[in-house]
Image (spheres, helix red, strand yellow):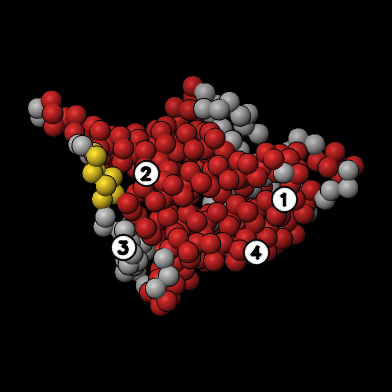
Amino acid sequence: MDFITFIDLLLNALVAGAMLGGFYAAVSIGISISFGMLDIANIAHPAMIMLGSFLAYTLNDHFGLDPLISMVLIAPFFGLTGIAIYRVYYRLFESRERDPRRGLAFFFGLLFVTDVALILIFGVDLRGVQTPYVDAMINIGFVGIAWRLLIPFLIGLFMVWGIHLFLTRTFFGLAVSALSQEPLGLRLIGVDPISIKQLAFGLSVATAAWGGAALIIIQPVEPSLGREYIGRVFAVCVLGGMGSMSGTFFAALLLGVVESLTSTFIGPSWSPAVAFGLLLLTLALRPTGLMGRAMR
């Protein structure tokens, strides 16, 4: 490999990795809220993302709606679904102070049921959307940027920025932060921690609608694809610092770039191991994550 070819591959791998990292932020931010801030290990979140992808596909296939419009329309439905899921979870586990591992089994069951339902409805064939930008490219010198990667990157950037402002500039956001620190203080000022927690969990599930739309823009999907993201989203959450929105974004960028470089220079088969490798390194060298947020 000559020097020019190496630089060409390196630059394209870095840019593609950064774009991929923005997408990883979009699918991980819900876990940063539920697991990082609420201490709820919602392993069914990737299944919610797949549900978002298939709803975006259905709206595109039947009505010609762009996934960017679909994700806005279906997000409130996902938010209400998240609130309902938390109410069931709370009544079965949190209110009775049962073993948290039983709650994990609850979300595993939800993951399984959602997967099976999607397979029964849509089958196992790949489904994709038709949009003008899916196959379009922007060429800047040696670097080619695919719109199907750039748009999910922008979605992830907007989500992180918007949710960060919402959680740091509003009373609701401050109440969410106080859940794990001063729940008694919330009660003393007349705020019900359970109500705040269910709304925050609804917000975390609502982000799956946006993540699902971003995923189906990048590539065609089939129901089992969501399982590939379980390790990635939790790795991003822990690597960035539990509950840190900015940490989630930078951790997702790091994961995307490292995966892209690994795929380009070593081989695609090694990419899935990158997330777990980064997670182990983080736990060993910096347990508080990139942004120094203490793990609870």
**Secondary structure of the residue carrying numbered label 4:** helix
Residue 115 in the figure: left or right of residue 84 = left
Asked if one can make out residue 116 in the rendered structure from this viewpoint, the answer is: no
Q: Nearer the viewer, residue 269 or 198?
A: 198
Inspect the image, locate mark 3, and give the three-letter code of the amino acid beneath it. Answer: Pro
Q: Quadrant of the N terminus?
A: top left
Residue 65 appears at what percent x and percent y?
A: 43, 70
- The earlier-in-sequence mark between 2 and 4 is 2
Q: Secondary structure at mark 1?
A: helix
Q: Is residue 189 above or below residue 86?
A: above
Name the outermost residue toward the bottom: 62
In front: label 3 or label 2 = 3
| Nearest to the observer: residue 114 or residue 245 | 245
Give the labeled residue for mark 2.
20
Q: Which mark is residue 197?
A: 1
Residue 80, numbered circle: 4
Residue to which mark 3 is pinned: 132
Amino acid found under the numbered disc labelled 2: Leu
Q: Which marked residue is nearer to the observer: mark 4 or mark 3? A: 3
CA–CA distance between discs 3 and 2? 20 Å
Q: Position of residue 217 (x, y in %)?
A: 37, 58
State whether residue 296 appears in this view.
yes
- Residue at 75 percent of width and 59 percent of height: 91
Q: Residue at x 61, y 58 (%)?
A: 106
Q: Which is in the foreground here, disc 1 or disc 2?
A: 2
Dot placed on the residue nearer the N-terminal end, 1 or 4? 4
